[in-house]
Amino acid sequence: MITFDEVVKIYPGGSTAVDHLSLELPTGKTTVLVGPSGCGKTTSLRMINRMVHPTSGRVLIDGQDVAGQDEALLRRGIGYVIQHAGLFPHRTVLDNVATVPMLLGRTRRQARADALAVLERVGLDAGLASRYPAQLSGGQQQRVGVARALAADPPVMLMDEPFSAVDPVVREGLHREFLRLQQDLGKTIAMVTHDIDEAIKLGDVVAIFRQGGVLAQVGTPQELLEHPVDDFVAEFVGRDRGLRSLSFDSAADLPVRPVADAGPDLVLDEAGRPVGWRSAAGVAGTGGVFTTADSLRMVTDLAISSPVGIAVRVGADGKADGIVTHHDLADFLTARRGQRAAEPTA
Ligand SMILES: Nc1ncnc2c1ncn2[C@@H]1O[C@H](COP(=O)(O)OP(=O)(O)O)[C@@H](O)[C@H]1O
Ligand SMILES: [Mg+2]
């Protein structure tokens, strides 16, 4: 557990960046710090690995004040991922990722083997290992950044706007990968973002900051959506609240059309698993599929980001078993809102 105990940060000659922050980040969970620009999120994050020192108050990891710890030792246990990945431009992907294991005393050979394993974990093809960062897409660079932070298998990860510099469709893929990875790894993660949607999607716990470095509210996404403590939080989480609350509603009851209704543009492999959408330019990936275990929010994201406005559902065997057009989805959501409004409030 990471604990902020009445932490204040005032930069020399500046105003208060962080104002009496008390917050607990549970072990093995993702805590997202979110709020408008300049509200002290990055400063708070950097006090965990001692890149910034508190003016007063304490930051503790598992009950130990970080102020008393050797910086180099402390940082070995803390992965750090930043926007634009921060990769070394003159080192290959493999050597970027192998850097930390080598610093930890692994031989070059062991470090490279570790690096290859972790690249695979974040969904990067081994064929990319010999490239230089400039030869990768933004999304691939960001994956390398995550791989590098994970290479030393640190129990704690700090992530500062890790997905902010990539376009929305790529970001969607990175989010899904992040959730999958974190489900396997269970790291203690502190993530910073200015995007409330991202916070709600990725955070087990979300801490909302306001200007002046003041913590406005902390809770699970559902708690924040359902019981905002004041107008600031309500306004911050509340825009388009209907869409956000879809994250908690299952796609199990969503009616689907037969796969054949998608027409010849939906490309399936021999087993009937979706491959992508055919267009004049070739076959583009589906951008993702959903199952009855996913949320309506996921289906909405898929339908919106699909080149043809259609989300494809698959069964447990990975075979396509239905489709939903964004028109069907809109009708379903409208009817459902009508039903809910008619229900007596408990
Ligand atoms: N090194 C610094 N020196 C002086 N002021 C700083 C420094 N870093 C950040 N600040 C100020 O502290 C406040 C909080 O900044 P920051 O933690 O970067 O916010 P956020 O990450 O939420 O955008 C801002 O007013 C910023 O200008
Ligand atoms: Mg910041």
Image (cartoon, helix red, strand yellow):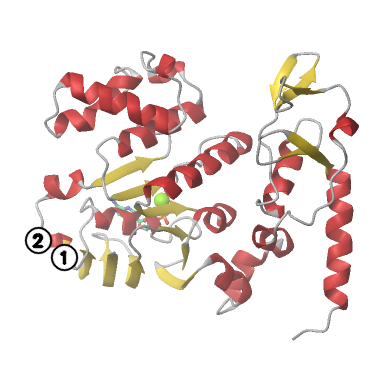
> In this figure, what is the number of numbered marks?
2
**In the rendered structure, are the residues bearing label 2 and label 1 in contact, judged by CB atoms less than 8 Å apart?**
yes
The image quarter in which residue 341 lies: bottom right
Q: Quadrant of the C terminus?
A: bottom right
Q: Name the residue under label 2.
A: 68
Identified at 56% across, 58% down, the residue is 200
How packed mark 1 is, by other alpha carbons closer than 10 Å (few <14, some 14-19, many 20 or more), is some
Rendered-image quarter of ligand 1? bottom left
Residue 209 drawn above or below residue 199: below
Mark 1: which amino acid? Asp
The image quarter in which residue 145 lies: top left
Identified at 34% across, 66% down, the residue is 18
Mark 2 and mark 1: Cα distance apart in space: 6 Å
| 283 relative position to 234: left or right | right
Residue 316 drawn above or below residue 88: below
Front in this rendered view, residue 204 or 168: 204
The image quarter in which residue 343 lies: bottom right
Q: Tag 2, which secondary structure? A: helix
Q: Can residue 87 be seen by looking at this rendering?
A: no
